[in-house]
Image: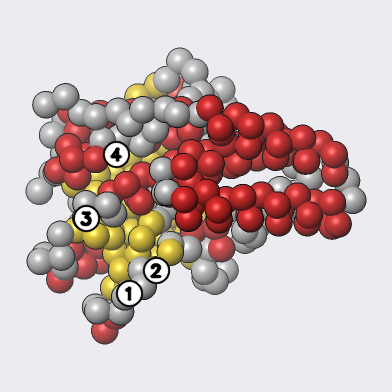
Amino acid sequence: MKICAVVVTYNRLDLLKLTIEKLLNQTVNLDSIIIINNASNDGTEEYLKKLSKLIICVNLKENIGGAGGFNKGLRYAYDNRYDYIWIMDDDTIATENALEMMLKGLKLLKNENIGFVCSNVLYKDNNPCLMNIPKADYIWNKFSEFSLVKVRNASFVSLLINRQVIEKVGLPITEFFIWGDDLEYTSRINEQFNGYMIGNSIVHHYMKENLGVSIVETENRIDRYFYEFRNKLYIAKNSGFGGIINYIFYVVKILIKIFIKSNNFKWRKIRIVIKGVFSGLFFNPKVEYIKK
């Protein structure tokens, strides 16, 4: 098998260095590490030029977000005929046998029509990373004795897929920019395949804080939550009537919480939510498929 890692980075050189170090020291050797540099201006491009030929750097002229970065990375890996592609953010710090455990899990799941497997994502203190807990399937425990949990979706923090899946389901949607691109993509994969979390494949997500993401409590980068409400409406519209109803309840709940709990930037947050919802009504990007 020809296996590569795809890492999307933007202005986090110190963390990227650690991510690369851990990838280079896996118990299963990678054939390549593909870095998608989202127009970083912190010296990332200059640093990557100094590394070994194992590190392939794709420098983008503009920041197209995580969604666009993973789109470019998966296309590059597919075009260069890698059999398996291990994708992650630039603050994903893999334990030395994380990839080995995913590959062992795939062998146990060989008859399960697998679309993806993902790692068990922990925070720096070894507690579960609240931002990266996949949604378990209704019947999740068929292989629980082997630390394998069937899931409906997962994050892009350590996800392993093969090239045949890309042929069938296409690429992540670049227009998402950030937020929900991993949810949409892994849910799309699960329409035709199965997904599993490999419990003993451990990676650590070096976020600043181990918090779920909510516009209610935050006071930083409020504008980025526009993408949450726009992109989630796209996902809801493609999930049928039930998805739309759940989305409406979610938006109403968030607006009430903002009004009651937010002391700062209350009206700015409400405007961002409404702007995202309104934009989501007309947001209808097309899935990009590979031309074989």
Q: Are marks 1 and 2 in contact (CB under 8 Å)?
A: yes
Residue sitting at x 45%, y 29%: 284
Q: Amino acid at mark 2?
A: Ala
Q: Quadrant of residue 281?
A: top right
Mark 3 nearby-residue class (10 Å; few <14, some 14–19, many ≥20): some
Farthest residue, direction front: 241
Q: CA distance from mark 3 to mark 1?
A: 15 Å
Q: Which residue is mark 3?
A: 193
Looking at marks 3 and 2 on the same chain, the residue that comes earlier in the sequence is marked by: 2
The one nearer the camera, 154 or 16, is 154
Q: Is 172 rendered above or below residue 27?
A: above
Q: Which residue is mark 1?
A: 140
Q: Are marks 3 and 4 in contact (CB under 8 Å)?
A: no
Q: Which residue is mark 2?
A: 136
Farthest residue, direction right: 263
The one nearer the camera, 98 or 151, is 151
Q: CA distance from mark 3 to mark 2?
A: 15 Å
Q: Where is residue 248 shown, x and y percent of the image? A: 61, 50
Residue sitting at x 43%, y 64%: 135
> For numbered disc 2, what is the local secondary structure?
strand
Looking at marks 4 and 1 on the same chain, the residue that comes earlier in the sequence is marked by: 4
Mark 2 nearby-residue class (10 Å; few <14, some 14–19, many ≥20): some
Looking at marks 3 and 4 on the same chain, the residue that comes earlier in the sequence is marked by: 4
Q: Amino acid at mark 4?
A: Ile
> For numbered disc 4, what is the local secondary structure?
strand
Looking at marks 2 and 4 on the same chain, the residue that comes earlier in the sequence is marked by: 4
Q: Amino acid at mark 1?
A: Trp
